[in-house]
Image (tube, helix red, strand yellow):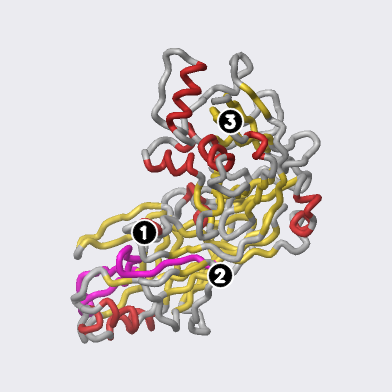
Amino acid sequence: MRLTSIVLALAVLLTVFSCSDPTLVGAGLLDDDRVDVGFSDTLSISSSSFINDSIRTYSPFTSSQLDYYLFGNFTDPVFGRSSSSIYAQVYPQSISPDFGDSTVVDSIVLVLPYDIDHFYGKAGGKEFGIEVYQLAEVLTNDEEYYSNQEVMAEPMPIGSAQANIKIDSLEFIDYEGTDTVMVKFPHYRIHFGEALADYFIGLDSTVYESDSLFLDAFKGLLLSPSTENEGMLSFDLLSPDAGIYLYYRQSPGGEPRRFLYDFDLQATVRFTHYSHDYEGAPVAPFLDSPQLGDSLIFVQGMSGLEAKLEIPDVADFQGLVINKAELEVYVASLEEDDNDFGPIPQLILTTPGSDGLPVVIEDIGIILSQNRSLKDLFGGTPILDPNGGPTVYKMNLTAHLQDVIDGNREKVLYISPLQKAETASRSVLYGGKHPQYGMKLKIAYTKP
């Protein structure tokens, strides 16, 4: 959307108003009390849900790496089964550990701090099982890894556990130097056998002095779910408390010490592997039938479902200045659903870029580039109806729609969760042709 056209249109509407932010242009112009502004909410929208092949879950660029790592094997009452495993390398806290011939092992434990804010479904208080395998294949930190990739692991687990998920803090004894300290935070613990501790202690000192030598000697971990649940966990692997804790003494009867192998941000690779099975689930018929898909659409985190929207008749607005365009999409209520599976907290809109890959629409790009509030300026968060009607998402696509009308963008949009690779939540939405709650594109415009 050209700023000069926007300013001209607003000068007609408001004699003393100006705005330099194209995402704010026409804010509030959808109110019924506005005059001299054309309005439409009758554009036809076709909608459907589609299955993703994969999404990227590791990038060599730190800014594009995950902050949190989903884990579990869970059944959703509408979307079927989803599973997430974690591949991760660990790295020693020091290049010169004080291990020697007389070193005695006390214990070795994997500590996985929870990211409770990204739990989903029925997770807290439930029993989750984890099996840990040692990788047999080297991960390379200058490559990308995707959610459909698998890495070879040794056939036998090096540790396993089943534990009730407690979201309050758990205490354990740790050491700072030789001082005993009590540490307390919410986490999952898996004890390994002494064989792994002996292996670490027995590594040559030159291995600890080299990133590549250590990551070749110990290639990393595969965390695999061993129970079926109705929820998904999330781990904060970048927490300074995460990692393999090796407790030892330099000699029998010596002072207790601790050496940490952590999920270092720079040197190591961490990525999630996702799989989804929709067979037999209530969502399945909608994925094979365009008619049904235009009535209900399904959007899901991880590498799950997304929605495609097509707006074929935007040419009717050729030559007009779009003051405000807002997409309204209502959350559907299904008999099979469960209140524990809440809607996605933040949706975004993407569109095909020049290379065919999806990019965020211009409105979102401008907001993010200015470090402004996505919720306040774009929307995309679920809004409850105080009168008991369906929850609604409202999304501002003013600049994007102007680009489509001007022929600079395709007439296609995708609905996706924000930070899709880090969320397990999902939303069932009424589609473009639903008879009562069909999605609407509300447009306020002026003639130049």
- Point out the stretch of residues depicted in magenta: 245-273
The answer to which of 13 and 331 lies nearer the viewer is 13
N-term mark: 3 or 2: 2
Above or below, 181 relative to 340: below
Residue 83 drawn in magenta = no
Dividing the picture into quadrants, the one containing residue 211 is: bottom left
The residue under label 1 is 238
The residue under label 2 is 148
Point out residue 31 in the picture as x, y percentages from the top left corner: 60, 19
Can residue 113 be seen here? no
Residue at image x 64%, y 46%? Answer: 427
- Decide if residue 331 is on the left or right side of residue 65: right
Disc 1 from disc 3: Cα separation: 49 Å
- Badge 3 amino acid: Leu
- Badge 1 amino acid: Leu
SS for tag 3?
A: loop
SS for tag 1?
A: loop
Disc 2 from disc 1: Cα separation: 22 Å
Disc 3 from disc 2: Cα separation: 44 Å
Point out residue 41 in the picture as x, y percentages from the top left corner: 68, 30
Q: Are marks 3 and 2 in contact (CB under 8 Å)?
A: no
